[in-house]
Image (cartoon, helix red, strand yellow):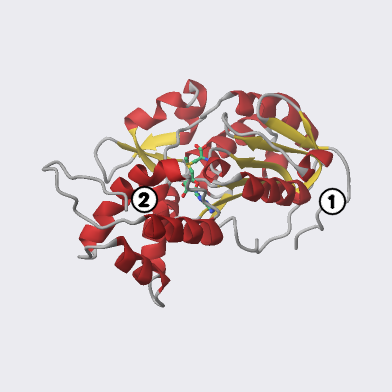
Amino acid sequence: MTTFPTETGAREFSFTDEDFRSLASLARSEFGLSLAESKKPLVYSRLARRLRSRQLSRFQDYMSLLKAPGEEDERLELISALTTNVTSFFREKHHFETLKQQLVPELRDQKRIRLWSAGCSSGQEPYSLAMTLMAELPDNAVRNLRILATDIDPVIVRKARTATYPQEDLQSIPPQLRERFTTKTTVQDGQFEIALEARELITFGELNLMETWPFQGPFDAILCRNVAIYFDQDTQQVLWQRFADKLRVGGYLFIGHSERVSGPALELLSTAGVTTYRRIKGPEAALAN
Ligand SMILES: C[S@@+](CC[C@H](N)C(=O)[O-])C[C@H]1O[C@@H](n2cnc3c(N)ncnc32)[C@H](O)[C@@H]1O
């Protein structure tokens, strides 16, 4: 049994190798998360507060709780504890340059423009997309634009919908866009909100990427950045393939700085820049309703 001492030297919770394996297997089957043996101390420290909060003394009991009916919220607490929601406006800004320079010119006369921020966290990514496209596209094209933004974590999706951020978070927004699309809120000190015209383009939803996707596409661009990093390679390869299937021919897939597309999806995707891929051949996803 592996033990992890508390500050006083005593182990607070029992956490056997079997508990870890069983937790890792649940995290993989339900959420696609990959937990290597080396993550054991990290998992212990991240989940210790959940055991405390549920007044349990053994990981074995926590595992039983997670599998019990009616414990959906605890399973979401588990994923929150094992992943991070770190994000920022215009993160990895070269992707937004690619959108501006390569994708936008193709979209000007398009009747239907669809983008997807998959693993959108607290919303900075889809709002950055909305600001970029609104600033670059003519009004008639903006009328055809919709952005889908999804995340597994309902708490973070609720936060994203509020579109409200502290002033320091706005620093990474290019000044012209910040000026046009953000205003100081009247209700909360030091908080700024994203303009309604940008918010209205976005549909937020809760979605576990491991499950069935209740929409068809095709998308002109999908951003799934710094999400697949938690998944093992087999799970990643299935995900890349599913994204490729949802892109129109010529559509873009943007992934996180430490991620790489691998596996069968490479037959459909060609490299188009740093952590940027382009769908190269059909058949395309069926048109959405
Ligand atoms: C580090 S954030 C990335 C946010 C944003 N894409 C970015 O790059 O700034 C990772 C997000 O992935 C979400 N996530 C983790 N596993 C997921 C899954 N199986 N399905 C959907 N979202 C997931 C987390 O809830 C978290 O909000």
Give the camera-side residue of 13 and 33.
13
Residue under the point 53% across and 47% down: 119
**Which three-letter amino acid code belongs to the residue tagged 2?**
Ala
Residue at 40% across, 49% down: 82
The percent position of residue 288, horizontal first and vertical second, equals 76, 59
Q: Residue furthest right?
A: 282
Residue 211 in the image, given as x and y percentages of width and height: 61, 62
Residue 214 % position (x, y): 65, 64
In the drawing, does residue 54 fall left or right of residue 138?
left
Q: Is residue 146 visible?
A: no
Residue annotated with mark 2: 81
Within 10 angstroms of label 1, few (less than 14), some, or many (20 or more) residues? some
- Label 2 Cα neighbours within 10 Å, binned few <14 / some 14-19 / many ≥20: some
- Which is in the foreground here, disc 1 or disc 2? 2
Disc 1 element: loop
Closer to the camera in the image, 274 or 193 = 274
| Ligand 1 within 8 Å of the CB at mark 2 | no
Residue that lies at the very extreme toward the left in this rendered image = 8
Residue at 50 percent across and 23 percent down: it is 174
**With 133 as the anchor, is 165 left or right in this view?**
left
Residue, disc 1: 284
Residue 182 appears anywhere in the view? yes
- Spatial CA distance of label 1 from label 2 is 37 Å
Residue 106 vs residue 108, the one in the foreground? 106
Residue at 75% over, 46% down: 244
Q: Is residue 19 above or below residue 71?
A: above
Tag 1 near tag 2, CB within 8 Å? no
Q: Secondary structure at mark 2?
A: helix
Measured as percent of width and height from the top left, residue 173 is found at 47, 27
Q: Amino acid at mark 1?
A: Glu
Quarter of the image with the C terminus in it: bottom right
Q: Earlier in the sequence, mark 1 or mark 2?
A: 2
